[in-house]
Every structure is written in structure tokens, then in C-alpha cells.
Amino acid sequence: MKPALAELLHNPLVWRGDQLARIEQTVSSGLVELDRALPGGGWPQNALTELLLDEQGIGELRLLMPALQRLAQASESIVLVAPPHLPHAPAIAAAGIDPAQVIIVAAAEDKHRWWAAEQVLRANSVGALLFWPGSLVEQRLRRLQLAAQEGETLAFVFATTARAAQPSPAPLRIRLSPAGARLRVDVFKRRGGVMSVPLLVDVADALSFRGVQRTPRNLHLASNSGFLASLGMTRPRARASFNRRYPIGGREAKIWNRALARADEVRRVPRPDSRGSCCSR
């Protein structure tokens, strides 16, 4: 190999396709084996992460809990857009997160959900976004990825495993499935070489993240079944929808202002309402 080429390949700014990409903005997953499989050693802060699963309550939220705990300890807020069920505040507190730091954005129509998720990412004022869309459209997903690139927010999008066969602009895609008492984690798309062997993660151990002071009282979450057991969630009693334009007054405005409270306090540049565009279906 010529010296000039060898010098170029050893340049830290050059990334080879068979190596994990160097990503500086990440948050540790709290699991050593998972961090080793993720480019940058953790969840990316400027890119979408797709979590694909067919059954709720298999431990998908416990997998994210160590990172969310770390963000909460840094006084960051966590936004949930259109969760299937409302979180149970005592269970969140037992997991080491102040319920006041968790913001719920509910919307009946899917286009309103996408719009809210995009605005949260563009505001770049919260630590993490967890988003459950009703359906996935590549154009909308691409807009969300572009919004994620502009900030430092952890962005997780939940979908079914049927999406795995379809292309996606998300740089990190993970398939989740139950494996007895553990969670099977298959990182099938990442910036780097392909992970040939899926990980088997004990999500119960994820809650013992060393950054959280735990007591015997919070060794487990609520014992409800299914998705409710993931984070002690309860059935939603009411849903709220947004107006077509930025809310000015009324109940919808209060919900929206909660979602972007910190952004409104700092500075927010008005943007056109994308929900009326051609991709709104």
C-alpha cells in the first residue's frame, strides 16, 4: 500500500464501511453489550432510531429507561407523542424519573401526530422524543430525520416489524422481540458493519443503571399486563386534537404549549404548517 493511501486510511476523519461510524453525540444505553453494537457507543442524539416490534409490553421502554433516566437527571424533559396508553405517574417516579419532566402530546389524527413530533425535534428543547405514529409514510419519516439532524434530541419512532423489509431514512433501525425473560435486540441497520448475531438483553438489569439511586421500593414497575407493564401505563380516557394552525387559545393551546414550553421561553421561529402539504394523508 502506498504511504499516502495508508496515511489517508488512518485519518480519524475517514470512516470505513466495515467499521462503526464515529458519532460524538450519543447517550449511553446503560447496557455495555448494546453500547458496543451502537455507533458512537450509545443512542444517537441527532438521528432517528426506529424500534420495530409486533407486541407491546415486551420491554421496549425498559430498554430505553437508563438513557431517559440520565436525561432526566440532567433536567431534560421527555416528550411522548401519541403513546398507546397514558403513563402512570407513580411508575415513572419509581423508575427514577420525575413525572413533571414527562410531557404527553395526544392527537387523534395521524397528521397532527407527525406535525407535533417534527416541531418538538425542530425546537431542540427536550432530551428525548418517543413517537408512536398511526402509519409510516417515507416522506414524513424523511422530514422527521431532517429535523432530528438539526438538534440533539434522542428520537425514537415505534413501528411494527413489517417495516423492516421497507427502506427508511432512519440511520439506526432495531428489531425487538421477546426471548423468554429477556429481550432479543437485532440491530439490522446502523452506520457501520452489519451485526450478525442479535443481542439477548435482560431489560430488568437495565433499570439498575448506575446513574440512578434506587431503593427497594422501586425495584420493579407496575405489574399490569402487556404494554402497561412496560411503564405502568393506564388506558387513555381522552384524546386531544390540534387546530390546523398554531393554537392561539383554548384547550388545544394549553396542551401544545406544554409540549413546547421550554422552546417558547427561549426562542421559536414560526414555521409553515406542514400538515396541509401533499404528504398529509
Image (cartoon, rainbow, N blue to C red):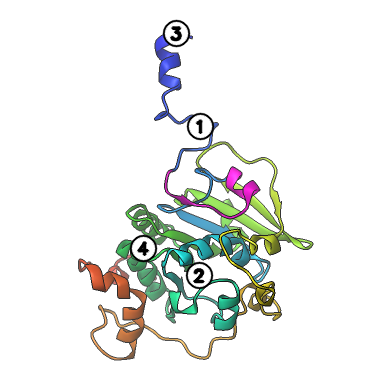
User: Pointers 1 and 2 in contact (CB under 8 A)?
Assistant: no
Query: Which residue lies under the disc numbered 4?
Result: 121
Residue type (three-letter) at the residue carrying disc 3: Lys
Residue type (three-letter) at the residue carrying disc 1: Gly
Of callouts 4 and 2, the N-terminal one: 4
Residue type (three-letter) at the residue carrying disc 4: Leu
Query: Which residue lies under the disc numbered 1?
Result: 17
Query: Which residue lies under the disc numbered 3?
Result: 2
Query: Which residue lies under the disc numbered 2?
Result: 132
Q: Secondary structure at mark 1?
A: loop
Work out how far the residue at label 4 is from the one at label 3, CA to CA, in angstroms. Answer: 45 Å
Label 3 environment density (alpha carbons within 10 Å; few <14, some 14–19, many ≥20): few
Q: Quadrant of residue 227?
A: bottom right
Work out how far the residue at label 2 is from the one at label 3, CA to CA, in angstroms. Answer: 51 Å
Q: Which residues are magenta?
A: 24-37
Residue type (three-letter) at the residue carrying disc 2: Trp
* Mark 3 or 1: the one toward you: 3
Q: Residue furthest right?
A: 180
Work out how far the residue at label 4 is from the one at label 2, CA to CA, in angstroms. Answer: 14 Å
58 lies left or right of 164:
right
Work out how far the residue at label 1 is from the one at label 2, CA to CA, in angstroms. Answer: 31 Å
For the point 60% across and 47% down, the residue is 188
For the point 59% across and 55% down, the residue is 30
Work out how far the residue at label 3 is from the one at label 1, CA to CA, in angstroms. Answer: 20 Å
Image position, residue 140 (x, y; %): 39, 61
* Mark 4 or 1: the one toward you: 4
Camera sees residue 139:
yes
Q: Residue furthest top?
A: 2
